[in-house]
């Protein structure tokens, strides 16, 4: 029961000086670009990438069928983890589950618990990581064991507001009272309330993890598909816990909103951003259907170029939007985060 370790392994990150130098260089490059045609062209190219991605997502959503298809709402993201894998037949799912369970049992009793329970006993946990890894058992095993070891070293089950009181009082992040129009819980981050010069990295990462856990409390995790379908089943899954939308659809994913209004070099925290990316990719994979980057100023463009490669395929979840778009497309009137409604 010693103190929490550093939230980011030294082998996973460059040194602090290199990170800060990279940030300074990128922000300097942004300043040189200025407000001229080069920056306009860069933003236009980014918009083209987002538009193309939306078209591919809509095409993919139309190809799905049954309960999972109903979870895809045009342009707003999904509610399920790994929609294509969710459609696999029960026999394939069962084989994958048993193979992953066997690998976990081979790892022995030294493997950390998942929220107080052996991971090998939780089919829903195994099915979650398998779907994220597209049913690749080896990759799912590696990712799940990495997650379990991190949870133990970071003492995730013991985190509370007493660990990061100053960070919490800043209200730089919170779980929104209202769900979005898809029935998904919403985690909000207000970037301008974060200060690179004042924060303590460990406390910032502890608060980030705590809010991820509170978001998880609002989400379901479906078990692998069964051969039959009855009351309480969605596309062959029996829903046993967590979130469901008003239309009865199971909700496994949340919506992330990062408000970038007034973003400046004081918020260009590459160390914390790297931890956040690790959390999204390694520790809570597939749990966010969409990350909305709201009202980003031109200075954010170069910072984003440093962060985006770390996200791998999860970079496709990010969407640059305005506050008006968030309020009108993702929320019922009057239910969006207050900070976005005031503009």
Image (cartoon, rainbow, N blue to C red):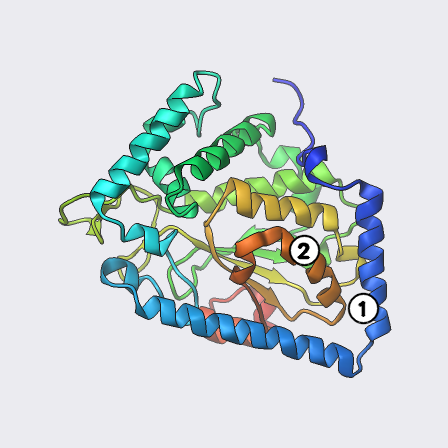
Residue 37's place in the image compared with 251, above or below, is below
Viewer-proximal residue among 251 and 78: 78
For image coordinates 31% across by 35% down, the residue present is 97
Task: Name the one closer to the observer, 63 or 238.
Answer: 63
Sequence-first disc among 2 and 1 = 1
| Location of mark 2 (residue) | 307
Question: Residue, x 37% and y 44% (percent of image)?
Answer: 135
Q: Label 1, secondary structure: give it.
A: helix
Picture quadrant of residue 279 = top right
Q: Where is residue 282 in the image (x, y as percent from the top left)?
A: 54, 42
The quarter in which the N terminus is drawn is: top right
Please indicate, yes or no, whether residue 200 appears anywhere in the rendered image.
yes
Residue 225 shown left or right of residue 113 in the figure:
left
Q: Measuring 77% from the left and 79% from the top, which residue is drawn there?
A: 38
Q: How crowded is mark 1: few (under 14 residues within 10 Å), some or many (20 or more)?
A: some
Which residue does the numbered mark 1 point to in the structure image?
Answer: 30
Q: Which residue is drawn at 34% across and 40% down?
A: 127
Residue 60 % position (x, y): 37, 67
- Label 2 and label 1: CA atoms lie apart by 15 Å
Q: Can residue 343 be seen in this view?
A: no
Residue 161: quarter of image: top right
How many dots with numbers? Answer: 2
> Is there a contact, CB below 8 Å, between mark 2 and mark 1?
no
Residue 136 image position (x, y, % from top left): 40, 42
The secondary element bearing badge 2 is classed as helix
Find residue 188 and report its horizontal and vertical position in percent.
57, 57
Based on the displayed image, in which of its 4 quarters is residue 31 positioned? Answer: bottom right
As drawn, the label of residue 61 is none
Neighbourhood count class around disc 2 (C-alpha, 10 Å): few under 14, some 14–19, many 20 upward: some
Describe residue 133's horizontal placement relative to residue 192 as left or right.
left
């Amino acid at each position: 029961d010693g103190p929490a370790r550093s939230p980011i392994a030294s082998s996973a990150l460059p040194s602090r000086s290199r990170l800060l130098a990279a940030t300074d260089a990128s922000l300097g490059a942004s300043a040189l670009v200025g407000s001229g045609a080069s920056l306009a062209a860069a933003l236009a190219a980014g918009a083209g990438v987002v538009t193309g991605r939306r078209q591919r997502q809509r095409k993919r959503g139309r190809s799905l069928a049954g309960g999972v298809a109903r979870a895809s709402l045009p342009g707003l993201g999904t509610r399920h983890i790994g929609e294509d894998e969710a459609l696999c037949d029960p026999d394939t799912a069962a084989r994958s589950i048993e193979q992953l369970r066997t690998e976990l049992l081979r790892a022995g009793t030294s493997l950390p618990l998942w929220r107080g329970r052996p991971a090998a006993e939780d089919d829903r946990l195994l099915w979650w990581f398998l779907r994220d890894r597209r049913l690749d058992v080896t990759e799912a095993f590696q990712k799940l064991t990495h997650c379990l070891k991190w949870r133990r070293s970071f003492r995730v089950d013991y985190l509370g507001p007493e660990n990061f009181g100053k960070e919490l009082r800043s209200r730089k992040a919170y779980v929104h009272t209202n769900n979005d129009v898809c029935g998904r819980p919403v985690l909000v981050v207000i970037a301008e309330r974060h200060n690179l010069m004042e924060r303590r990295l460990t406390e910032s990462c502890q608060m980030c993890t705590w809010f991820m856990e509170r978001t998880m409390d609002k989400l379901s995790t479906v078990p692998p598909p069964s051969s039959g379908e009855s009351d309480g089943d969605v596309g062959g899954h029996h829903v046993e816990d967590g979130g469901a939308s008003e239309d009865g659809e199971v909700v496994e994913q949340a919506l992330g909103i990062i408000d970038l209004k007034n973003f400046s070099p004081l918020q260009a925290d590459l160390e914390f951003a790297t931890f956040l990316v690790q959390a999204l990719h390694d520790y809570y994979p597939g749990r966010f259907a969409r990350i909305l980057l709201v009202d980003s100023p031109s200075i954010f463009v170069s910072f984003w170029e440093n962060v985006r490669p770390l996200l791998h395929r999860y970079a496709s979840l990010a969407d640059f939007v305005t506050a008006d778009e968030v309020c009108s497309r993702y929320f019922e009137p009057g239910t969006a985060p207050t900070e976005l409604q005031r503009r």
